Amino acid sequence: MNLLVLCPHFAPDVAPTGEVMSAIAAALADRGHRLHVVTALPWYRHHKVEDGWGGRPWRTETTDWGWITRLHPFPTDKTNIPARAVAFGGFTAMSVVAATATRMRPDAVMVMSPPLPLGVAGWLAATFRRAPFVFNIQDVFPDVAVELGAITNPRVIAAASALEKFLYRRSDAVTVLSEDLRDNVGGKLGTHRPERVHVIPNFVDTERIAPADRMNSYREQYGLGDRTVVLYAGNVGLSQSLDLLVEAARRFRDRDDVVFVVNGGGSAKDALVESAAGLDNLKFVEMQPRERLPEVLAAGDLHVVPLKRGLARSSVPSKLYSILAAGRPVLASVDAGTEVATTIERALAGVSVPPEDPDAFCAALTDLLDDPARRTAMGESGRAFVEGWVSPAAVGASYETLFEQVRRERWQRRA
């Protein structure tokens, strides 16, 4: 099949969703499909276009499996919602042109969201090319932004919700990462064919990410020594309640055997660094290159996944599966009954506590820090769990089956 894919990030960009889509594209290419990927120039790490990629707002490169068209993302401050809306609008407009001008005749069009407006570009391209439209949802928008308080204007919320439902109803299929996200999206479709929502979970590459020696060059470089490392690795944004880690560092500052690390960058980092002033047991490390991820994960003795209240119902952080693949235990601060909490429970890979509850978080942390044998058992159990999880190849096969299904259904409706 010929497949047109629109996504906000793609390799070599280091965004988690870029990692996901790059692996899906590779799996589809391995199955003999040709792709045209329309994406942004690499910009995630420093929130600006990477060195060596500037100078042109639009460039297309040829690959063994098709083409990649990279467009300027118009990066802005994440906390400036109006500016981000304008940036998304500009990127979406360029994506419409690039997608409709594709040199291939697509058999299906897939779009990754967020950003939600990118779905408009995919829908227009699919309509213009008379191809099925598959909407891939990583985080449910505007739910996430509303929960965070990033969007409070009722008119803006209503407009975003209307656009969300418009795109769901005009898609031939919607893919989500978990059953609770399917319930969320299916509820918004109501009687408008909620069966079009399919669960295709993200994957973990258990060959690339595997248990490794905790004493590595990452620890040496950042002076962590042989201390127990409590690590958060990922985006430092509005979705994460990383103030829990600051409070934990404050309460555990007298323990010389423990150090807390925040590895990553984002819009909330400056405020977090300021709140942690004077805490020598909390270190901030810049986001590391993609190839160093296995080493970063191995350096942590205990990983934390903290999401603000309500967000775990609209978002599934892909870092969870990478942590389990690395054979490390997890302390999650998330809503009960959501994908993160139930995965940890099924895998016997850690502990989850209610979100934004420093007392519960620190109590669980104390128990885990004082029981290294339990942490080791959790890490081993998590690794065993993801070894039976879907691989990139299996996810690629699931998308292939879905594309064939929506194409067949489109032909039947025409007939």
Image (cartoon, grey):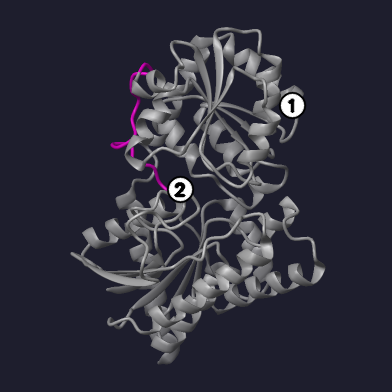
In the picture, which quadrant includes the C terminus? bottom left
Query: Label 1 belongs to which residue?
Result: 358
Residue lying at the far right in this picture: please name it. 154
Q: Earlier in the sequence, mark 1 or mark 2?
A: 2
First to last magenta residue range: 201-215
Measured from the top left, where is residue 109 in percent x and y?
A: 40, 74
In the picture, which quadrant includes the N terminus? bottom left
The answer to whether 349 is drawn above or below residue 192 in the figure is: above
Query: Label 2 belongs to which residue?
Result: 45
| Residue located 61% across and 47% down the image | 267
Q: Secondary structure at mark 1?
A: helix
| Residue located 33% across and 53% down the image | 12
Callout 1: few (<14), some (14-19), or many (20+) C-alpha neighbours within 10 Å?
Answer: some
Taking the magenta stretch, the answer to whether it contains residue 344 is no
Measured from the top left, where is residue 220 in percent x and y?
A: 38, 18
| Residue located 38% across and 24% down the image | 218
The answer to whether 210 is drawn above or below residue 185 in the figure is: above
Residue 8 seen in the current view = yes
Measured from the top left, where is residue 84 in percent x and y?
A: 61, 64
